[in-house]
Image: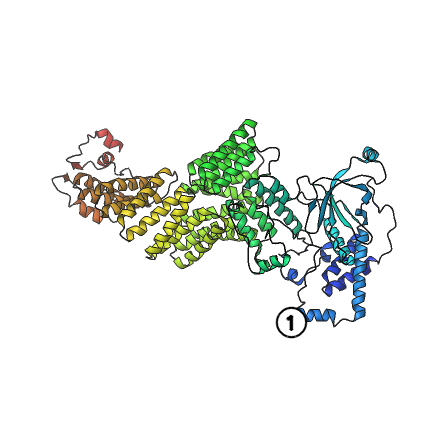
Amino acid sequence: MRETTAGTAQLPEVDPPAAMYGKAQVFQEAEEYDEAALHFEACMGLDMQINFHNAVVQSPRDVTDPTQPQHIHNTFTDDRQRPPKDNHQTPDSSLRFECVGMSTDSAVERQQDRGQAVDEAYRALKRYQINHRRLEFLIDDHERSGGYGIVRKARLHQSSYLPTWLASHHYGPPELVAVKQIKISVADVKSEIKRAFTKEMLIWSSLEAHPGIARFLGFYARDDFSEAWLISPWEPNGNVREFIQKNQLEVPEKLSLVYDTIDALDFLHQLDPPVCHGDVKSIMTGKLPYEGTFAEYAIIVKIFEGSRPHVDDESRLSDCLQVWELMTRCWESEPGERPTSGMCRTAITFLPRCPPTLVDHTRSPELLENLGDLESWKGNYDEGLAYLEQALSLYEQAGNERGVASVLRKQASVSYRHSYPLKAMKAASAALKKLRNMNDPLATAETLYLIGSSLGLRSENANALEFLKEALEIFRANSNDIGTVQCLERIGEIYRWQMNYTDAVSNLDEASHVARRCGDKLGEARVILVLGSVEMDHHDYSQALGLISVGCDIARKIGWNQGVCTALLRQSFIKEQQADFDESEKLARESITLARRYNSSWRLAQGLLRLGYALNHRSQLTDAAKALEEACALYAEISHVSFEYPETARLLFHVKHAQGNFADCLRWIDVAIAEYRGLGDKLSLFHCLLRKGSCLRLLERFDEAALHYEASLVLASETGVNAQYARGILSLIVKTSITWERTGIPPKPRSLYSNNKSSVLCDMKKLQRRIPQIQTASLKLKISPGELRNN
């Protein structure tokens, strides 16, 4: 058994627990919270069966705002002044009530009660007292100095009287421990030292086991409190600050330490009553806040002046602005504006992180895959994929199927993030195949989300919704708020694309509520931008601009550059609709600069399209054509299907037409026709055929012009569009070049976006098979009767 100085000694007589509990209630009503807490805790130490929840001592702020944890500040500092009991009592009158309105006898009695409560709580902790003869301090360079004491390395032997070898034989080897020797000066009031020391031990000894919190082993203190020590297991890597300074850690490794710290803080804040640490260092920088400022009053002045640390490349916080944004919110002067520990944990959960590697300097596959994710987030697509390929190779060599699935999922995420949906679906499908055989529901849900989102980029909306809803069900079943938000946001966006605004807003509102509740700033920004787009679709541009501006601000703070680009592009579109072409151009150029910096091909193409519109409206045709040609080249490389590519080609046709460059006109209108054909957009295809026919007429290619007008008539009959203009133009075609007859094809109205594609789509051979009456000087195709019957 482990020997302590308490041994079997009889504890002195103490007040009955009921009387002690009554005194605690009196102190609580008088707002003497520390004294009340000590009395309650003394009752707990005497094993009194009291409901701990009912013994929670709260300040007036805690009562009115239960979401804020009770702040148990560092016990070796002066107590802060308590707030007045009600709104009519000023701090001065409260002090007067305590110091003047109370009799000397009452003050002395209360002081005695306070001392008695401390003594009884201290005696209840005697079972943790360790004989100092069991401690053997080691002479090395491991002595550490903290704000309130010196930490020394020691061996804790299992006996204070047996020889070391015999004690080790009977009770086991000594344990390496950290002994925190409290700084005590002759000027300190020993009763206050005892009170603070007792309070810290009461809190620490009552904590449950948690991997992020040092275990309380015991204490030693002289009777006169000229010495007081706290004892915990020795951590060979030191504290976080020392560990970071000794090791050259990568950003994902630092983020792992950040997450572990926040997880421990969240554990403390969830206790009843909550416990606040009050002494957390900056892990990302390895420095103390306001490093170099030693006087406490100088730090206080800086805080009240609003002076805050700033981001720089050296601190590496610029690599992960989400952490920086979280830190700035934690520094808010108003407590209600600060995030809870749970919100902080949410903000870090999905950032790329892995435990530090201490064996050697070789990068582990876990570190490589998280570095790949980080580089992708920063916009470095090629660098991100290179890291992931290295990680995949190492996992495959080790036969680690779970690691392989993880890398495939991250490859899919990187490709989706950079708008390569085909690559994303290929990697995600391979990951899903492996994950189906593993018990990893969250990784499976994340993979389903990536497949669904990639299908959405390819306008395969029905299939996309199926995958996204399956992912949403899994995330909800596992109470994963971040996954829930990202699925609801994508589902809402797809419903918006389908013009199903009721379901879109329903899903987006739920996503917004969950994101705000859990502190998911990235999810919140995503949802706000889509809600702004809904208002934009309804032409409520004022409301849309307000929402998009809020989403843009959040995106900037957390370093979500793709979101910033999206916001700028939508703002540019709105300004264009409001005929503010100068501002539209300015916003488009800003988005282009950002997209080039972070290698976002899709956002760059979108920015160039918006710039092309602005320049075209201002009749700057040469610059407009240059921007639009670059945009078309980018869209041709991107594999997802959208209306943006044919829209860009169509606009470029108009610019070239205005320049009188009719030969180039045909090239770009053909691109638009081919893309609209693939999308099944017959209405847009109809208009493109008319424009191409007009261009061919100007080039005096009358036979081809007539064929395109004929094709537009076929589409008009299928869609129910008025084709009077096309018939009129066709009748003006030179008679010597073409003989045109009415085909007598009855109109058959269909959906404008029907998947049943017309068999006549600007292909002259197919057109003549459909309308054999067409005869031209240059087009003489031999058509067999069998071909006509088959058509």
Q: Residue at x 20, y 35 (%)?
A: 772
Residue 263 position in % (x across, y down): 62, 46
402 vs 41: above or below: above
According to the picture, the residue beneath numbered tag 1 turns out to be 88
Could you say where residue 220 lies in the image, as x and y percent from the top left? 79, 48
Residue 52's x, y, as percent? 73, 54
Q: Of residues 667 and 790, which is closer to you in this image? A: 667
What's the coloring here? rainbow
- Which quadrant would the C terminus be assigned to in this image? top left
Answer left or right for 226 relative to 720.
Answer: right
Q: Using the rendered image of the protein, determine whether residue 158 is visible from the camera's viewpoint.
A: yes
- Residue 516 appears at what percent x and percent y? 54, 53
Q: Quadrant of the N terminus?
A: top right
In the picture, measured across the screen, residue 31 lies left or right of residue 463, that is: right
Q: Place residue 48 in its image quadrant.
A: bottom right
Vertical position of residue 393 compared to residue 713: above or below: above
Mark 1 surroundings: few (<14), some (14-19) or many (≥20) residues within 10 A: few
- Residue 166 found in image quarter: top right
Question: What residue occupies the far left of the structure in this picture?
Answer: 736
| Residue 463 visible | no
Across the whole image, how many numbered discs are drawn on residues?
Answer: 1
Residue type at numbered disc 1: His
Residue placed most toward the observer, 397 or 402: 397
Quadrant housing residue 189: bottom right
Q: Is residue 488 left or right of residue 160?
A: left
Badge 1 marks a residue whose secondary structure is loop
